[in-house]
Image (cartoon, rainbow, N blue to C red):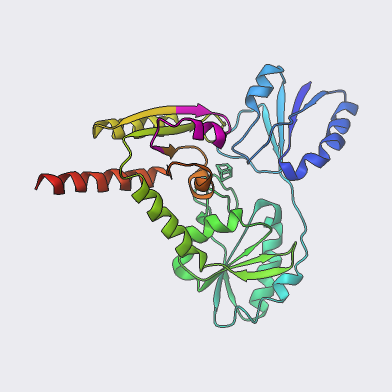
Amino acid sequence: MRILLQFPEGLKQQALKHAKALELEGNEVFISASPTFGACDLALDEMRTIKADKLVHFGHCEFKSAGSDVEYVEYRVDAPLDIIKDTLSKLDGFRTVGLITTIQHIHQLEEIRAFYEKSGKRVLIGKPYGPAKMDGQVLGCDAGSAASVDKDVDAFVYFGGGMFHPVGALLATTKPFFVADPFINKFERIDGQREVYVKKRKGKVLGALGAKRFAIMLSTKSGQFNIGLAKTLKGRIEEVGLDAEIVVANTFDFDSLNNMMEFDAFVNTACPRIAIDDSDRLRKPLLGADELAEVLRMKGELESAKKR
Ligand code: SF4
C-alpha cells in the first residue's frame, strides 16, 4: 500500500520512526513536509498527486467527516500535574470550576477533576459544539466545552501548553479564566485580555467602514473550505453596491495578501482564528463574517442618516 504520512509541527520529529515501521510492514511510505495547522488541514492534494492509497494524519482527532482513505492517529501526552496542585490558593472563592484541555491531555481531565473535587470544588466539563469530539476538549475553532457551561461555573481552568486554545475559549466565555501550563509550570489568570480583543475588534470594524472593495478569503484546506459562506458574503456586499471578489489559497501568505492593494478590506472564511490572531499581519482590516455584518449594518445606518 502507498501511504502518505502527515504530522503537525510538534510531531514532525517522529516522522522517520513511523515511516520506517510502516515500511517494514511492506508499505511504500511518503512523508508530507508541508506545514499542518490542525485536523482541518489534510494533505489531500499531495495524497492525490502521489496517488497514495491512504493518508495517515497524526496528532489530531477526526475533524468533520474525512474519507475512508484518511486515518487519524490521536496523540496523548502525560503532562505533569504538579501545577494543578499549586492552583488551589488562586482558585479560592471560585467554588464551581469549568475544566477544559486539548485532545493531547483529554485523558488527564478525570484526574484533575478528582483532585479539585477532593479539595471541595465542584467541577463541570462541558460538551463541544462542533468539530471537537470529546467532553472538555477545545479546539481553536470550537470552544463549546467551555461555552456550554459558562453560565454554571465561577471560573475556568484550561490545562495545557500555549495560548492558542485558551484564547478561543476565553473569547467564548464571560467568567474568570485561568491557564495552567504544565510545560512552563505557570498558572496565570488571563480574563483581563478579553477587553484587548474587544477593542481590537472595534478598531477593525471602524477601519473597514470606508471600504468599497472587499476580498473574501477562501481556503482550499479540507476542513476550512467554506465556498457557500464565501459566495453568500460576496452577494451581501454586492447587494449594497460595493465590490467583492473571492481570493483562493491553501495557506494564506500575508505578504501576498498585502500585495493585493486594490482591496480595502479582507473577509476571512477559513480558520476563524485567522481574523482574530493574524489581523496585525495585514495592512488592511481583516474581518470575520460577523464583523463584516457589523460593518455593513453600520454603513447602512450611516447612509440612512445622510439621507435624513
Ligand atoms: S482552529 Fe483553525 S486550524 Fe485549528 S482545527 Fe479549527 S479551523 Fe483548523
Q: Residue 283: x, y in percent?
A: 47, 42
Task: Residue lying at the far right in this picture: please name it.
Answer: 24
User: How many discs mark residues in the rendered view?
Assistant: 0
Residue furthest to the left: 308
- State the residue at coordinates (34%, 50%): 206
Q: Position of residue 106 (x, y in %)?
A: 67, 56
Q: Is residue 81 left or right of residue 125?
A: right
Residue found 71% across the figure and 76% down from its top: 86
Is residue 161 or residue 1 the one in the foreground?
161
User: With 94 as the anchor, is 297 left or right in this view?
Assistant: left
Q: Tell me the quadrant of the picture where the N terminus can be found.
A: top right
The reply to whether residue 106 is in sight is yes
| Residue 111 percent coordinates (x, y) | 71, 67
- Name the side, left or right, on which 140 lies relative to 26: left
Q: Quadrant of residue 212?
A: top left
Residue 136 in sight in this render: no
Which range is magenta?
247-265
Residue at x 67% of width, y 23% of height: 46
On the rendering, which quadrant does ligand 1 occupy? Answer: top right
Give yes or no for residue 255 being in the magenta stretch: yes
Q: In this rendering, is residue 136 above or below 61?
A: below
Indicate yes or no whether the magenta region holds residue 140. no
> Residue 213 occupies which quadrant of the picture?
top left
Q: Looking at this view, is 105 or 83 the one in front?
A: 83
Determine which quarter of the picture holds residue 159: bottom right
Residue 153 percent across, percent down from the top left: 50, 71
Measuring 68% from the left and 23% from the top, which residue is drawn there?
47
Nearer-the-camera pick, 216 or 118: 216
